[in-house]
Image (cartoon, rainbow, N blue to C red):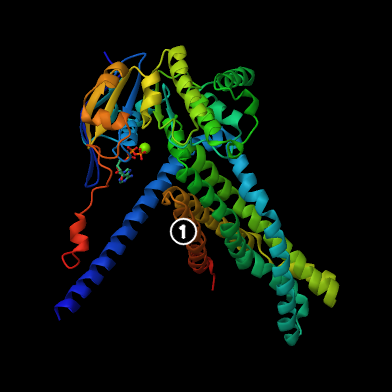
Amino acid sequence: MPLVSLRDVRFAYGERSVLRGIDLDVHRGQVVAIMGGSGCGKTTLLRLIGGQLKANSGAVEVAGHEVGKLGRAELYAMRRRMGMLFQFGALFTDMSVFDNVAFPLREHTDLPPTMIRDLVLMKLQAVGLRGAASLRPGELSGGMARRVALARAVALDPMLILYDEPFAGLDPISLGIIGQLIRRLNDALGASSVMVTHDVHESLEIVDYIYFVSDGRIVAQGTPDEIRASADPFVHQFVNAEADGPVPFHYPAQPIDSLLGGRSA
Amino acid sequence: MNGLFAGLAAGLRHVGKLTIDGIWRLGFATRFMFAVLLASGQSLTRIHLTIRELYFSGVLSLLIITVSGLFVGLVLGLQGYDILQRYGSADAVGVMVALSLLRELGPVIAALLFASRAGSAITAEIGLMKTTEQLKAMDMMAVNPIARVVAPRFWGGVLSMPLLAALFSAMGVFGGWLITVVVIGVDDGAFWSQMQAAVEFDYDVLNGIIKSMVFGTVVSLIAVFEGYDCEPTAEGVSRAITRTVVTSALAILALDFVLTSFMFRG
Ligand SMILES: Nc1ncnc2c1ncn2[C@@H]1O[C@H](COP(=O)(O)OP(=O)(O)OP(=O)(O)O)[C@@H](O)[C@H]1O
Ligand SMILES: [Mg+2]
């Protein structure tokens, strides 16, 4: 049985329908990438899995529980076994790097301070930032902040890790480092990971399976090898970074003629 | 004619929408208040969280409260002496200074200063945490942001307000004594003994304390609510800070009237 499964999930922000029937599985031990253009609903998808949003219809299941039906206490129990990396890190700005990583441990365990210290330094060591433990989030570069957030997300050894755009705004070297980290942490923890990203090439290197989202639906999927070999126009457009193709560049709007025509608007 | 009618309808719709939004927000604020109270357990069991906020809103407001209290006392002394000596009762200036401070100026001005110094800081802090998704991140880590972030700040404010108001009044009395006794030369003994005879603990002092507790609760609630409810953008945070200061000031002055009229013995 997959760890995460979405069945015909639909979601709208008020009137604006974002997801229109998503089916998706994440099996244990896998790193799965979800790709799609900006604004296609990738963050929304992660929020549904994390239980921050409820689907309008369809089922979101994590470890056999239907997320939308959990009460607050059960949802929190589930989230203790989940880690999430936010698109912009979301480090606590009033705490040092060390305290940020220690936060989930202090909140959810009764471990003695020496043990917490060892665990935190171990996690920071894993992302290569043990030396930065005493810095403040404001003193970190974007890539470093992302790595600290990563260490914090895995502090409690989660069974499922959700990554929102882990590669956005990184130089090619940091990007490679984060990519390798995601793979290594996943395998070392025996966890499963869902990664939302636009970066096809990095993803093809590290993930087990890829879903392409467009217009609220899964339009293509496959293992990295299948994706590389695919003749699907969506996949082709994405892998080759072409502006023209099935993935729309424009936010839905009234036809431009109606504006240029003047009076009818 | 048609245009006028359409304009009128649009105006009415706008007023209606504002009213509905306002009522909705009030309902939301009430629900929020209960959520904060329900989630307050941690603020007590993990008292260091509250003490930290007590430090930020209380201790860091000490300077402005001390200095302002002193100046207000100096002015009260001057004005009080000027008025009272016309009736030959300059000795009563101590009474006047003490009663004005304990009953009104201490609680009210300290609360106004507290709203602009600590209240705005609380709103800014929570608003910024919301804008940078720190609250969402906390929630995803199965830590309730209302219990961990909001409630300690609320209680920190509630607890520090009466203490700050008391300090303000004490500094004011000191200021009044300084200007009238030391500078002008009012009799020292008369200044204190008249004050001692005229100030009643369970009327003047107690009512002042009740006022400052009410103001502290209301200002803290407004500050945490505006921060938590702000639109998560830079302008959203700045608008929320403004609203904290303005709403708090109005609430303090209006409630002061309500409380005074209940306490008034006529
Ligand atoms: N809170 C919200 N209220 C209303 N609409 C929203 C909200 N959040 C997102 N949307 C809309 O939903 C759509 C999907 O948003 P989402 O953040 O999931 O996109 P995304 O795929 O993560 O984009 P990006 O790659 O730019 O991060 C967007 O078109 C956006 O306009
Ligand atoms: Mg996104």
Which quadrant does ligand 2 occupy? top left
Give the letter of the chain under mark 1: B
The local crowd at label 1, few if under 14, some if 14 to 19, many if 20 or more residues have their Cα within 10 Å, is: some
> Mark 1 belongs to which amino acid?
Arg
- The answer to whether residue B79 is visible is yes
From the viewer's perspective, is B102 left or right of A123? right
- Residue furthest toward the left? B2
Mark 1 sits on what residue?
B239
Residue A166 lies in quadrant? top left
- The answer to whether residue B39 is visible is no
Quarter of the image for the N terminus of chain A: give it. top left
Quarter of the image for the C terminus of chain A: give it. bottom left
Compared to A200, does B172 lie above or below? below
Rendering coords of residue B79 (x, y %): 71, 79
Rendering coords of residue A110 (x, y %): 55, 20
Q: Residue at x 26, y 17 (%)?
A: A226
Q: Is mark 1 within 8 Å of ligand 1?
A: no
Q: Residue at x 67, y 49 (%)?
A: B59
Compared to A94, does A63 lie above or below? above
Residue A207 lies in quadrant? top left
From the viewer's perspective, is A147 left or right of B188? left
Near-viewer residue (A77 or B200): A77
Q: Residue at x 24, y 31 (%)?
A: A234
Near-viewer residue (B25 or A5): A5
Count all numbered tags in the image, as a single digit: 1
